[in-house]
Image: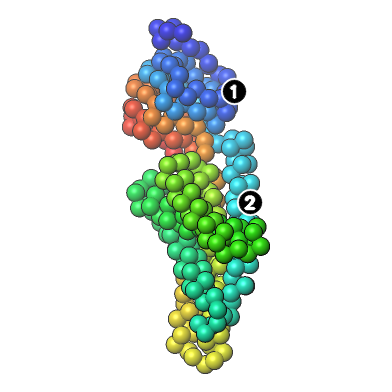
Amino acid sequence: MASSSPLNFANQDLRNRSFKGQNLNGANFSGCDLRGCDFSHALLQDANFERVKTGQTPRQFIPSVVLALVIGLLSADGFSKMIFGLLGRTPAEGGWSFVIALGVSLAISGIFSGLRVMMRPKSLARRIATIISGATSGALLGFFYGGSTTDNNVQFAIAGAVLGGVLMALICWRVRHPLVAVAVAAAGGVAGYGFAFFTGATAIAYLSAQKLVWGVFWGALSLGYIGLTMNSLILVVREIRHGCGTSFRRADLTNAKFDRAILQNTDFSGALGSNNFEYS
């Protein structure tokens, strides 16, 4: 339909509809429920969005919750088994290099995940932190499940770590979907807690041997990572609540009207004309 004959969707329930890339110049969406709609890359010049409602729908919310639970459980299973399998080993015993690698990986994933909550949502720093945390968690999960599914074959475990790390780095770099952020935060939170447990156990061992300086050091580090874990959990909740909704990403909203609109969980990133009104 030509833009000279505006499309009339007034007062309709359009939840979860996709208008991606469509020519909707002059269309009338006044009074519509647009929660969960996708208007990305659409032409919406002079469109009427008065009194619309935007935001998240259960269809978007439930998959995020399920993904967070699945990733959290898989991470908890893998990380805990690796930690308990290596806990108590000393440098004189075999496999010490795996202890170091596990500790460093858990620390990296946990700290970058926990710090993301203090960064601006679309900043370069947060994107880099997401890539690092996601890649490290992917490598850990790839190592564990690559080895456990092949009768603890070290070569397959290492190959799984490389594949998992590279794959997650590429996904975090290329795919800017809310579900990716949820998955990274969930895995990073579990990794942070795993490192907190690991360092806490080390602190207890030193304190039991009356080595107070090292005991206090590892204990303080453990408490710090508990705080980072809480940050990651907060981030998971935020990503689930605000990650999905109505998208006007890179749409042309020149002269579009949003008077008295209720705008929540709405993505206007890269949209033309979106600076003419307020949104959340």
Label 2 Cα crowd, 10 Å radius (few <14 / some 14-19 / many 20+): some
Picture coordinates of residue 253, whole percent (x, y): 37, 24
- Callout 1: SS: loop
The nearer-to-camera label among 2 and 1 is: 2
Q: Position of residue 167 (x, y in %)?
A: 48, 49
Compared to residue 44, the image places residue 145 above or below, namely: below
Disc 1: CA contacts within 10 A as few (<14), some (14-19) or many (>=20) = some
Taking the image as shown, residue 148 lies to the left or right of residue 91, namely: right
Task: Answer above or below: position of 66 versus 140.
Answer: above
**Residue 146 can be seen, yes or no:** yes
Task: Identify the residue at horizontal 48%, vertical 65% (top origin).
Answer: 105
Q: CA distance from mark 2 to mark 1?
A: 32 Å
Name the residue carrying label 1: 13
Residue at image point 52% right, 22% down: 31
Q: 76 or 146: nearer the eye?
A: 146
At x 45% / y 19%, what residue is drawn?
A: 22
Q: Earlier in the sequence, mark 2 or mark 1?
A: 1
Which percent across, then down, holds residue 83?
59, 70
152, above or below 10, in the image: below
Which residue is label 2 attached to?
70
Question: Residue at horizontal 66%, vertical 62%?
Answer: 151
Which is more toward the observer, 244 or 93? 93
Which is more toward the observer, 39 or 145? 145
Image quarter of residue 200: bottom right
Residue 134 visible? The answer is no
Q: Position of residue 207 (x, y in %)?
A: 53, 88
Dividing the picture into quadrants, the one containing residue 258 is top left
